[in-house]
Image (tube, rainbow, N blue to C red):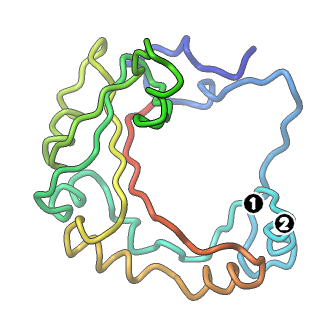
Amino acid sequence: MNGTTDTVPADQPWDESHLSKYFFHTDPIPRLSCTDPQALQLIAQEKPVVLTDTKLCDTALKWDLDYLAANMGTERYMVFLSKNHKFKYYDEAKIKLYKTNFVPPTRRLDMTFSEFVKKLRDWKPGDERVYLQQGLNNTVGQGIVVDFLQFNWQWLNIQQKTNNWGPLTSNLLLVGMEG
């Protein structure tokens, strides 16, 4: 077992059997209230914890494909296409300095969110898989900006100060396919 799920057919619905199996021991991640001292201690120790009640991004809970398509606006966004489910990052400018015969594992296209949703919905097994990556900035629609501004920034800022985290540099909307 190498930690991959390459044997899962692309058209098969996801279930827990698709979780990667590893040769090393893994522990369950605790689910705790954001006010639980143990949760705050785990955060301070940089250990994983699922916080059940921060309400950090409650206004984004309605962000399904239909809502995003209606509220992202008509800008063009960065979409990657891949022949498999792996979307490995590489720096397009730097890779040319080190690999002269580099063949990119993905293709990048710019398309509107509605075009992206159509590509997702029209997808058939054997088609390239698609993945959208977009910064939450002034290029997204006003409805998304309003939702984003209502995130629980107060709680996050307290954690940032308490744990000596650096500045928040970016917030990304990442939309991928199942599987």
Q: Position of residue 60 (x, y in %)?
A: 39, 68
Q: Is residue 129 left or right of residue 35?
A: left
Q: Position of residue 149 (x, y in %)?
A: 38, 82
Rendered image quadrant of residue 100: top left
- Amino acid carrying mark 2 in the image: Leu
The correct choice, above or below, for 103 with respect to 24 in the image is above
Please give the residue where the numbered disc 1 appears in the rendered image: 49
Toward the viewer: 131 or 122? Answer: 131
Toward the viewer: 89 or 93? Answer: 93
Q: Residues within 10 Å of mark 1 (few under 14, many from 20)?
A: some
Please give the residue where the numbered disc 2 appears in the rendered image: 42
Residue that appears at 23% across and 60% down: 67
The correct choice, above or below, for 143 with respect to 82 in the image is below
Tell me the number on the disc at residue 165.
none
Q: Is residue 117 left or right of residue 49?
A: left
Residue that appears at 53% across and 24% down: 98
The correct choice, above or below, for 136 with respect to 124 in the image is below
Counting residues from the N terminus, which is met first, the one under dot 1 or under dot 2?
2
Q: Are marks 1 and 2 in contact (CB under 8 Å)?
A: yes
- SS for callout 2: helix
Q: Position of residue 86 (x, y in %)?
A: 48, 25
Rendered image quadrant of residue 43: bottom right
Q: Is residue 83 left or right of residue 2?
A: left
